[in-house]
Image (cartoon, rainbow, N blue to C red):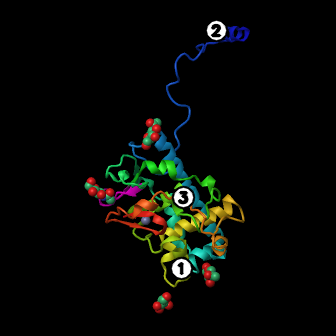
Amino acid sequence: MQFLALALALCASSPVTALPAKQTPLPLEDPVKSPFPIHHSCNATEQRQLATALQETVTLVSHAKDHILRWGNESAIYRKYFGDRPSLTAIGAYDIIINGNPETILFRCDNPDGNCGLDGWAGHWRGENATDETVICELSYTSRRPLSTMCSQGYTVSQSETNTFWAGDLLHRLYHMPAIGQGLVEHYADGYEGVLELAAGNGTEAVHDSETLQYFALEAYAYDVAVPGVGCVGGEDEEEEGDETTEEPVQDDQDETAEEEIPENCHTHEGGELHCI
Ligand SMILES: *[C@@H]1O[C@H](CO)[C@@H](O)[C@H](O)[C@H]1NC(C)=O
Ligand SMILES: *[C@@H]1O[C@H](CO)[C@@H](O)[C@H](O)[C@H]1NC(C)=O
Ligand SMILES: *[C@@H]1O[C@H](CO)[C@@H](O)[C@H](O)[C@H]1NC(C)=O
Ligand SMILES: *[C@@H]1O[C@H](CO)[C@@H](O)[C@H](O)[C@H]1NC(C)=O
Ligand SMILES: [Zn+2]
């Protein structure tokens, strides 16, 4: 009581109004700033989560680009995914995410095509209905992981889906939008093994393959940032032991349902990842 009396006395002598009777009209902090436009159909919490995930996407590809610029084909990770191909294309594919004009695309939350009602759909490109728009469904907010959990909770680069992390998932979605992928970044390989085969082959596609660009960015981040100098490639050990109980992380919600109802514009990837074009 003495303290309160003192506080009141001090306030009374100050020109500033005593206690904050009214709520300050504006929040003190700006909402999380998104690197890409987010439609007003996303509510406050969706906006913040999606903006954070898109920031992480930029973080992920910025690191990938820096890794290539610094090491080029001296990097074993580079050679693993891109072979001896020149690095310019991959650098550009990452840079357009970081420095391209973001206003050409839009992320929305209102399910305008009804696809979010389909079991296991975490989002989709709007295709012919709106070629610069991608819808993010509720499932994304509850299932996709932040990059800070890289190399934990059972995740390994070789055994887990690239969409385990929201940043990887969104990178894939960004490349499907013509303003970003430009029809050049496409699907030429499927899954970890497929991507390694593509790199080992004699074609030129590895440097503009959507999956390759995702895997490279994830492995470079795992090795350089998450567990420096170690990473979490996984794979060989589990296979040698023939351990069939090795579990994929739970993120793969699309697994069982994907095959049942695949629209014409979609294809499933190994492991049930659904891609709609
Ligand atoms: C935003 O929508 C999601 C459902 O997609 C809901 O869980 C969440 O509570 C909503 N947030 C606000 C602030 O209304
Ligand atoms: C690395 O790139 C240089 C050119 O930048 C090329 O001369 C060299 O053959 C490449 N090495 C490998 C192992 O691909
Ligand atoms: C485009 O809209 C039509 C009609 O609403 C819908 O049937 C179709 O699935 C939509 N396409 C995509 C890619 O969502
Ligand atoms: C690339 O490899 C395929 C088989 O893997 C072969 O048929 C083709 O001739 C090769 N092309 C060149 C240019 O070496
Ligand atoms: Zn795809």
Q: In which quarter of the image is ligand 5?
A: bottom left
Q: Residue at x 61, y 73 (%)?
A: 78
* Residue 43 makes an appearance in the image: no
Asked if ligand 4 lies within 8 A of label 1, the reply is no
The C terminus sits in image quarter: bottom left
Q: What element carries label 2?
A: helix
Numbered mark located on residue 164 in the image: 3
Q: Where is residue 158 in the image (x, y as percent from the top left)?
A: 59, 69
Please tell me whether residue 32 belongs to the stretch shown in magenta: no
The residue carrying mark 2 is 12
Q: Distance between the residues labelled 1 and 2?
A: 76 Å
Give the magenta part as a residue range.
123-133
Report crowding for label 1: few under 14, some 14 to 19, many 20 or more residues within 10 A (C-alpha). Answer: some
Q: Position of residue 150 (x, y in %)?
A: 62, 57
The residue carrying mark 1 is 197
Report crowding for label 2: few under 14, some 14 to 19, many 20 or more residues within 10 A (C-alpha). Answer: few
Could you tell which of marks 1 and 3 lies nearer the N-terminus?
3
Instruction: Check disc 3 and give the amino acid type.
Output: Thr
39 or 18, nearer to the observer:
39
- Compared across the picture, whether 191 is left or right of 109 comes to right
